[in-house]
Image (cartoon, grey):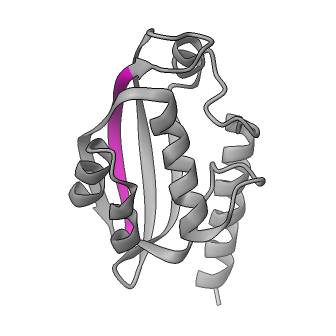
Amino acid sequence: MKRLYDGLNRGNTLVMDSVFAADAITHQAPDSMSSGLPGAKEFVQGWMDKITGFHKSMDNVLADGNLVAVQFTLTGVNADTMAKNRNINFAGIDLYRLDKGKIAEQWSYWEQTKMVSEMSLNIHKKTHVTSDSTHHHVKKHHNKSLSKSSH
């Protein structure tokens, strides 16, 4: 994970090629984005384009089997026209499911109200994801995992 965050903090989305599976699922990415690794890169690039000095710190890391959780703080300066030059500083958690040593799925949760206020939203031009839809994806995946493990 450190290699991923260090690379992204240098503005290098190419680092994702070596840590994400080709068919990785980024649950927060809008449906209009590409799927797999290209969609994950597009999603992250959307954040980087809107935040000058994008920096996502790894405050705490927890691992349990094939799941890794990273508590982060995202900082930078809003480069978007709606709230240009406003400082960004909000916390969140990234949850990753690994398969064969690569990220197969990613969920991100953040201080929604603070992020919306500081960004004056729209991170991605095409659409934005609400926390309700995020929770739907997690619940859906969790239920699938439970049904698989009970057989």
Residue at screen point 74% across, 44% down: 133
Residue 73 on the magenta segment: yes
Specify the principal SS of the magenta part.
strand
x%, y% of residue 39? 61, 60
Quadrant occupied by the C terminus: bottom right
Q: Is residue 56 left or right of residue 35?
A: left
x%, y% of residue 74? 37, 30
Q: Is residue 74 visible?
A: yes
Q: Is residue 90 left or right of residue 107?
A: left
Residue 20 on the magenta segment: no
- The part of the image, by quadrant, that contains residue 56 is top left
Asked if 81 appears above or below 31 in the picture, the reply is above
Residue at screen point 34% across, 25% down: 75
- The part of the image, by quadrant, that contains residue 148 is bottom right
Q: Is residue 63 left or right of residue 52?
A: left
Of residues 82 and 62, the one nearer the viewer is 82
Residue at screen point 39% across, 55% down: 13
x%, y% of residue 40? 54, 59
Residue at screen point 64% across, 22% down: 121
Q: Tell me the magenta residue range.
A: 67-76
